[in-house]
Image (cartoon, grey):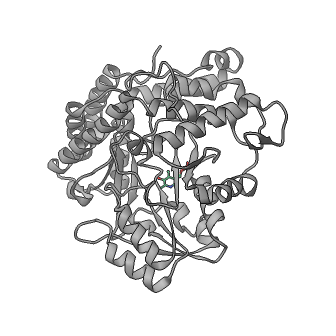
Amino acid sequence: MPVSTAPGHPAPTAPPRHPGEDAVLRQDPQIAEVIRGERDRRSRTLQLIAAENFASPAVLAALGSPLADKYAEGYPGARHHGGCEFADAAERIARERATALFGAAHANVQPHSGSSAVLAAYAALLRPGDTVLAMGLPFGGHLTHGSPANFSGRWFDFVGYGVDPDTGLIDYAQVRALARERRPKAIVCGSISYPRHPDYAAFREIADEAGAHLIVDAAHPMGLIAGGAAPSPVPYADVVCATTHKVLRGPRGGMILCGAGLAERIDRAVFPFSQGGAQMNVIAAKAVAFGEAATPAFTAYAHQVVANARVLAGTLEAEGFEVLTGGTDTHLITADPAPLGVDGHTARGRLAAAGLVLDTCALPYGDARGIRLGTAALTTQGMGEQEMARIAALFAVAIREDRAEREKGSGAARVRAEVAELAGRFPPYQG
Ligand SMILES: *Cc1c(COP(=O)(O)O)cnc(C)c1O
């Protein structure tokens, strides 16, 4: 089957515009003001939240298209509603592009989010009460990997693996020992903050030995995988869950890849088990994003994301931050700002005041929080290694500013001016 790609895909640096903003402006000034405020905020500050990106104008246009109004419960050719011929076409194209892009036998593009994709994967493979082995939350596991506040922790018996305290790397000997001892029904490989490539072959071997399914939750690296900048879990996993909005730069949503043998179970676990009607505008936007991700421009983008993250991590380390695992293979950096005299919460606050927007995150040992950041959005804006080194230096200024400076707000103001200059030189939106 030929790989279908979206015509007229934008270059990785093409600034998106919000389609339909003018219509909101005419009808609803109150919400128009909110949208404009968010657009200005994103234009004036730097987005280092590891899970965020700027989707292309074509992706945003598909989201605002008439497909938004279409009800299409079921799957192409087998819908519970009439008038689905174009909805079917959108979903078929999205599935074909996803399977071609990732080399998978089957794709389900309906999950409303990454969490919905994981829920469906569990529903397809597990029964309530089953034991599941996943990365523990303090080490970077996602809420859906056994948090007591989430369905996963409530309905399954989760066992957590961790990282080696010296290297910060996944302790495969521990994963193997836990799998032997607890005989889980499934092993989950994936994280919200682990900056290195997991050893998918090792996970496969451990899962086979324990008779467990291997679920890879590739929500973060899926865009890097699409661009050939990270190894693919597809040959190793029974099921791969992902988001489409992180490095992959599509609309907010989820997807699932699996082999032909599990296709029917996965499809039924999404609809009708855990979802109703699919969001056809989002599925069309996913198709657009898969088309963009199949281009050489996206391959260059994905590699630049990683090159940028390596420079950012290296410069942060030189500025005194403790970079976990000593660097990164991906778009993600997890760092402890303790050597600069602050914890993650204080660091996030001072950085936000200076226009540098990122998250705090759990650190593997101890109660203090660290910071988590990524380079997907900055790279979409067209920034390169030079800008990364400059931004890392601004981090240190914003966090280190002494008390007198802080009271006057002069350190943050200085950084804010430099941030505004960078954001102005690499504008994320047109017009
Ligand atoms: C982001 C993420 C998710 C959830 O995605 P949502 O779309 O926010 O539900 C799940 N798992 C991992 C590992 C993630 O990083």
Quarter residue 325 falls in:
bottom left
Count how many numbered circles sit on residues in the image. 0
Quarter residue 127 falls in:
bottom right
Q: As drawn, is 116 to the left or to the right of 85? A: left
The location of residue 21, given as percent across then percent down, is 60, 19
Question: Residue drawn 58% across and 31% down?
Answer: 285
The location of residue 124, given as percent across then percent down, is 65, 63
Q: As drawn, is 274 to the left or to the right of 369? A: right
Asked whether 117 or 401 is in front, the reply is 117
- Of all residues, the one furthest to the bottom in this rendering is 181
Question: Residue drawn 48% across and 50% down?
Answer: 219
Question: Residue drawn 59% across and 40% down?
Answer: 95
- Of all residues, the one furthest to the left in this rendering is 318
Q: Quadrant of the N terminus?
A: top right
Asked whether 412 or 377 is in front, the reply is 377
Asked if residue 286 is positioned above or below residue 402 in the image, the reply reads: above
Quarter residue 339 falls in:
bottom left
The location of residue 133, given as percent across then percent down, is 48, 73
Asked if residue 155 is positioned above or below residue 318 in the image, the reply reads: below
Residue 282, can we see it?
A: no
Asked if residue 209 is positioned above or below residue 304 in the image, the reply reads: below
Asked whether 289 or 328 is in front, the reply is 289
Q: As drawn, is 92 to the left or to the right of 341? A: right
Residue 200, can we see it?
A: yes
The location of residue 280, given as percent across then percent down, is 69, 35
- Of all residues, the one furthest to the front in this rendering is 1
